[in-house]
Image (spheres, rainbow, N blue to C red):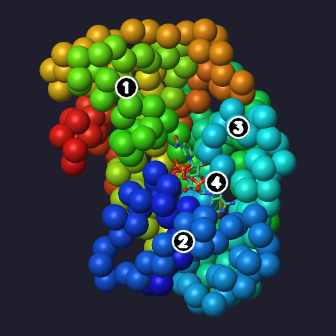
C-alpha cells in the first residue's frame, strides 16, 4: 500500500517508518513539508500524493506547552487531525490517528479500556479528545489508536534518565503516577497490521503492565547492571504546568479480536531497549 505519514520525523514517526516492510511505499512528511494546521495545504498536499492510507502522527506533544498555548494545541492537534481526516475522505484513503491515555481523567483506578468515556483534565487531553471525535465523524475508514508512556526513542524521559544512570549519575522517576509503559518499537510494529485489518474503530495499544516511571527506571538499572543511582520524585514536586492523570494505564477489550499480536512483557521490552534493539 501507499502510505503518507505525518509527523514522520517525530519519535513515533521515525520508529513507524523504520518498521514498515519494504514492499509498502512510504511518503514521510515532516512539519516542513506539511503543516497539518493549514487546511488548504493539507487538502492539496495529500490529494497530490494519492495515498491508500494516511498514518497521522503529527501533534504538538508538549503537554505543558499546550496548557500555555491552547490556540496552538487546538490548531495542531484538533484542527490538524480534522484536516487530515477530511483529506483522507476526499481521496478515499483510510486514516490511522494516534491518540493518548491523557484523554482520561485518572479517577477510574483500574486500566482504561475502549468502553471508558474520555474526560480529559488538560488542554492537550481536551484537544486530543476533540481530534478523536472529529476523525470519527469525518472519515468512515478510520483507526484511532490510544497509547501512552512511550519510551525508547532516544529523546523521551526514560531514555534520558537511563543515559544518566548508565554513565554513573542519578536518574529520577515519578513514583506516584501510573501508566502502561510502551516500547515505541513495539507500538510502531503494531500500527500497520491494525490498519491493514480494516476493522475501523478505536483501540488501545499499550504495554501489558501498569506501573510508574520510577519502577521502570529501577528495573532498567537492575536489568542493565547500570552503575548510577535512581531517585524517586513526587508529581507535585516536579511543578509541571498541566494537570496529568495520576492513573492512566490502558488495557484493551478489542485488540485480541484483531490480527495484532499481544505486547511482550515489560521486562522483555526493557531488555531490548537497553540492548538498543
Ligand atoms: N510520546 C508519548 O508518550 C505519547 C503518548 C500517547 C500518544 N502519543 C501520540 O503519538 C503521536 C506521536 O507522538 P511522538 O511521541 O512521536 O511526538 P513527537 O516526537 O513530538 O512527534 C510529533 C511530530 O509532529 C510534528 N508536528 C507538530 N506540529 C505539527 C504540525 N502543525 N504539522 C506537522 N507536523 C507537526 C512535530 O514537529 P516539531 O518537532 O517540528 O514540532 C514532531 O516531529 C502524537 O499524536 C502523540 O499525541 C504520544
Q: Are marks 3 and 1 in contact (CB under 8 Å)?
A: no
Q: Which residue is most to the right?
A: 71
Give the mark nearest the N terminus, 4 or 1. Answer: 4
Q: CA distance from mark 2 to mark 4?
A: 13 Å
Closer to the N terminus: mark 4 or mark 3? 4
Looking at the image, which residue is at 19% across and 16% down? 227
- Ligand 1 contact, mark 2 (Cβ < 8 Å): yes
Measured in 3D between alpha carbons, the distance from the residue under mark 4 to the one under mark 1, in whole angstroms, is 24 Å
- x 19%, y 20%: residue: 226
In front: 9, or 134? 9
Q: Could you say whether the residue bearing mark 3 is in a helix, strand or loop?
A: helix
The answer to whether the residue bearing label 4 lies less than 8 angstroms from the nearest atom of ligand 1 is yes
> Which of the numbered marks, if any, corresponds to residue 29?
2
Which mark, by number, is residue 59?
4
Residue at horizontal 64 percent and vertical 82 percent from the top? 46
Q: Which residue is mark 1?
A: 161
Amino acid at each position: 500500500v501507499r502510505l503518507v505519514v505525518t509527523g514522520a520525523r517525530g519519535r513515533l514517526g521515525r520508529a513507524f517508518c523504520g518498521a514498515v516492510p519494504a514492499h509498502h511505499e512510504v511518503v514521510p512528511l515532516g512539519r516542513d513539508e506539511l503543516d497539518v494546521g493549514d487546511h488548504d495545504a493539507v487538502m492539496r498536499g495529500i490529494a497530490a500524493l494519492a495515498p491508500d492510507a494516511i498514518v497521522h502522527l503529527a501533534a504538538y506533544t508538549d503537554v505543558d506547552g499546550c496548557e500555555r498555548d491552547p490556540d496552538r494545541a487546538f490548531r495542531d492537534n484538533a484542527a490538524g487531525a480534522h484536516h487530515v481526516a477530511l483529506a483522507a475522505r476526499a481521496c478515499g484513503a483510510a486514516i490511522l490517528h494516534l491518540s493518548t491515555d491523557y484523554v482520561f481523567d485518572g479517577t477510574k483506578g483500574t486500566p482504561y479500556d475502549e468502553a471508558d468515556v474520555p474526560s480529559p483534565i488538560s488542554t492537550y487531553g481536551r484537544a486530543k479528545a476533540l481530534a478523536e471525535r472529529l476523525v470519527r465523524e469525518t472519515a468512515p475508514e478510520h483507526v484511532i489508536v490510544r497509547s501512552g508512556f512511550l519510551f525508547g526513542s532516544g529523546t523521551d524521559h526514560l531514555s534520558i534518565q537511563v543515559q544518566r544512570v548508565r554513565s554513573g549519575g542519578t536518574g529520577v522517576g515519578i513514583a506516584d503516577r501510573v501508566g502502561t509503559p510502551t516500547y515505541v518499537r513495539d507500538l510502531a510494529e503494531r500500527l500497520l497490521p491494525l490498519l491493514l485489518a480494516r476493522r475501523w474503530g478505536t483501540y488501545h495499544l499499550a504495554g501489558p503492565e501498569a506501573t510508574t516511571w520510577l519502577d521502570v527506571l529501577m528495573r532498567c538499572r537492575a536489568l542493565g547492571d547500570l552503575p548510577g543511582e535512581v531517585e524517586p520524585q513526587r508529581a507535585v514536586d516536579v511543578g509541571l504546568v498541566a494537570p496529568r492523570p495520576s492513573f492512566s494505564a490502558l488495557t484493551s477489550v478489542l485488540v485480541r479480536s484483531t490480527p495484532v499480536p499481544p505486547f511482550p512483557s515489560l521486562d522483555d521490552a526493557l531488555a531490548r531497549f537497553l540492548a538498543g534493539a
